[in-house]
Image (tube, coloured by chain):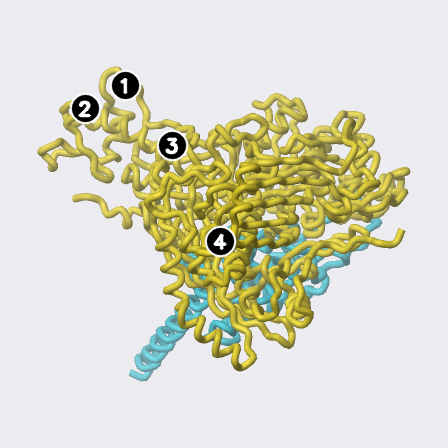
Amino acid sequence: MSTLFEEVRPSDGGAGDAVPVRRVELTVNGERRAADVEPRLLLAHLLRNGFRLTGTHTGCDTTNCGACTVLYDGVPVKSCTMFAVQADGHEVLTVEGLATASELHPIQEGFKDEHGLQCGFCTPGMMLAAKALLDENPNPSEDEIRWALSGNLCRCTGYQNIVKAVMWAAEKLGANAESDGADDAGDDAGGEG
Amino acid sequence: MALDEIKIGGLGASRRRVEDNRFIRGKGNYIDDIALPGMLHMEILRSPLAHARIRSIDVSAAWAVPGVRMVLTGDMLAARNLAWMPTLSYDTQAVLATDKVRFQGQEVACVVADDPYIAKDGCEAIVVDYEPLPPIVNPTQAKAPGAPLIRDDKTGQDSNVVFDWEVGDREGTDRAFAQADVVSTIDMHYPRSHPSPIEACGSIADFDRATSKLTVYMTTQAPHIIRAAVALVAELPEHMIRIVSPDLGGGFGNKVPVYPGYVVSILASILLECPVKWIEDKSGNLISTGFGRDIYLKGEMALRNDGRILGVRMHTDSDHGAFFSDAQPSKFKIGLMHSAFSCYDIPVAHLTAQGVYTNKAPGGVAYRCSFRVTEAMYFQERMVQAAAADLGMDQAEFRRINLVRDDDFPHRTPWGFLTDSGQYGKCLDLGLEAIGYEDFLRQKEEARQRGRLLGIGISTMTEPLGAGNSREYDILGIKMFDSAELKVHMTGKALLRTGAKTQGQGHETTWAQIVAHELGIPAEDVLVEEGDTDTAPFGMGTYASRSTPVAGAAVAMVSRKIRAKARKIAAHLLEVSEEDIEWELGRFSVRGAPDRGVTIQECAIAAYSNMPDGMEPGLENNAYYDPPNLTWPFACYIATVEVDPETGVWDVLRVVAVDDCGVRINPMIVEGQIMGGLTEAYAMANMQFITFDEDGNCIGSNYMDYLLPTAWETPGFELHEVVTPCPHHPIGAKGIGECATVGGPAAFVNAVIDAIGDSGVRNIDMPLLPDRVHEAITQGHDVSGAPPVKTEP
């Protein structure tokens, strides 16, 4: 984990020193970040404008569309309706943190393989909501997927392929877990030998 | 050995999408993701009232907010002759209000500041003194004697009527009605709806004083039209204007018009000499930008007892809001309303249409629809169901009797369109078989005995997609062609650019498939770019399901030009005459000696290194394509529902879709378009609409009031296909993007009306909210969705 700290003041222009700021320190996608923010700054805007993590989209401003969904200590939240200061001391996962340097997360692969996106605007929030579901429930039914994603609006796909994408990811994650388990067993056996 | 077209990602391959690689990583580049150095932010102050005279605007407190850099009002714009702008329908629209506000949400002032929060603070500090005027919320009110004149700014405008229009054969239709055994009538309202892409509109204007160049990043489905409009309206030289449409978070027609926010951000950038960003919020998008529909029908059909339709009469009253700014490029005042009944063999028909101004947001954009086609097909299919009921005939059988037969093409429709291909009966039969029609009718009857209400709704339609042909379509005089430019590099890789603009349709994937089909260059070797007017060839953009019919055709045509040149190079390389060269996918060979050949890639390198004497080097070309006709896809949508008589809630049991959009470039993407369209159809039938109260307050100005279906409510879809190639399109494709949104709503509504058939109710206006359905069942009367009108003085 990086220990990088940085100074970000999203509102520094002519507003001058009259605007009160508060320091927030949080972990974003595994990296420690810090910023001095106005108390009214929304978390979505800190992520997008302060940290330039523009994969978190703002769609509706009223907590309905879910395009701004991020995981907050592992729980999906709508970052357009949280203040940045509320994230102080917490962990945030955005879409940019889903893939590793070398490989995509199975949810990302599933969305591509099952044509679970068209314009792509809802996709980051949709994938993070899906991740929260699969973290809790590795083998969800179609109804469970539809219910878990019902806080995220998609205007393009009609959801059917999004459901398939999540099922695709569940299967891949399950297969990965099985083969990891097999590897572990093999290692143990080797250790004993 | 011949190439396997599917393996190289050619026609018919469900190729995974290229654009997804950035979207799934959160690396899309949408308007709000763009940040330019020194950029300022603009917010719009909107009118809280639907109709009011502006007594005064005091902006002094806004200027006093620290960080505010500029406050713009209508008077400032008027001084520069920019307070009003022309619309695409030859009317004018206020940019910032000067005299009156004419709808709730109208743009009154703009504040530019260091960040969007400060700009909003600035807007809140502006004090506007309004003198309220009586609001008008529907056509009846607008046409009433003594109604307040909304457009008192226009000389010669002495009523609220925008247009009167008529098409068809009035006398012939009267004669048909005189001969009818049965006349079936039905009145209804197609409510105002909003395309509502999840991403709202926005722009970043960047005027560079040093070079006099204006660059505008803008959420637009038609960047070249915008460049032309900016050149003509702002009188800036066209070569010094660059419009860039970045990734769009959906469009559905909402991002075709020019909105005041774009215009003011451009002016602010020119005045401030720095980049100015305007990002619309959701309420601003829903309350002020182009809506769809809002039209009333009086429909009549002349019927013979044996089920034949003898004639059709329609009158529509459309509500255009405060400014007539329909984004529709046909020569017809009410768009393509007269494409109704194109799939049926109708001897004669007559349509009258009147449009009015009201105190509502301007527009009448084509919301996932080619200019009123959605309304036309909804009215058609609701009228057809009512007619079948009036004749006591099965609704499927009534359609079968009247559908145009396969051997009747080309077929002249009653209002003058020419349809060219289709297998309508086959599609209907496939749909009925898939849903298990006879079985369902039995189930329905059994359920009825037990007090349960099941219903089945059918919608069959062909619609004109792909504006246009230039005889009937232009935008401000510009003919509706489209374009493609293909550059094959020396290694056989290629760059393709078109005048269209993808918003989720997947052009970066599918255009490369057409090149692969025509040239045998693997799709993955073709980079597709769109949306930047400095690099893309001039085209009319993406809406009206026109990308594949027009730009897609241009891609095929430019590929053929490249192949023609490559053939000459191949003849040179193989040392035979051109006539002795044969083509198979990706390779030229010598006739009679198939082993002697060169690949398209070998021709590409030769185009730069070993071309024949006298030939220009390089392997590049462009094509401009003006289609000879519209394309006419056909669809049969069937829905089954169960209505709860206690609550009026209805659930979808099954949805079957049979689509014939000709040759499918990428079946996976086509199916995605159909499922997305069906979802919007379900949305309009079930929950999604914008209405107004009697004071003209917009009900539906945010996602808490304007309901979009989630994954939970949205039904599953069962898709089927029939392929009748388009006879005039180079690869036989037809438009598809809008079909399901156009044809879908009637299937759901017909199903609910079928379910409550015993009540004697003929119509419930969309959306079929539980309270409306409950009222229909319990009161036994039709339920109107028209906005309420203020009755007290």
Give the amino acid at mark 1. Answer: Met
Q: Which residue in the structure is indicated by mark 4? A: B740
Give the amino acid at mark 4. Answer: Ala
Instruction: Identify the mark nearer the N-term, 1 or 2.
Output: 2
Between circles 3 and 4, the one closer to the viewer is 4
**Alpha carbons under labels 1 and 2: distance apart:** 11 Å
Instruction: Identify the mark nearer the N-term, 3 or 4.
Output: 3
Q: Label 2 near label 1: C-beta < 8 Å?
A: yes
Q: Which residue in the structure is indicated by mark 1? A: B615
SS assignment at label 4? helix
**Alpha carbons under labels 3 and 1: distance apart:** 18 Å
Q: Can residue B271 be seen at all in this image of the molecule?
A: yes
**Alpha carbons under labels 3 and 4: distance apart:** 32 Å
Say if labels 3 and 1 share a chain.
Answer: yes
Between circles 1 and 4, the one closer to the viewer is 4
Horizontal and vertical percent position of residue B733? 37, 43
Q: Quadrant of residue A175?
A: bottom left
What colour do you see for chain B? yellow
Q: Quadrant of residue B514?
A: top left
Q: Can residue A149 be seen at all in this image of the molecule?
A: no
What is the number of the mark on residue B486?
Answer: 3
Indicate whether B407 appears above or below B620: below
Residue drawn at 71 percent across, 38 percent down: B323
Instruction: Identify the mark nearer the N-term, 4 or 2.
Output: 2
Indicate whether B218 appears above or below A19: above
Quadrant where the image shows the N terminus of chain B: top left
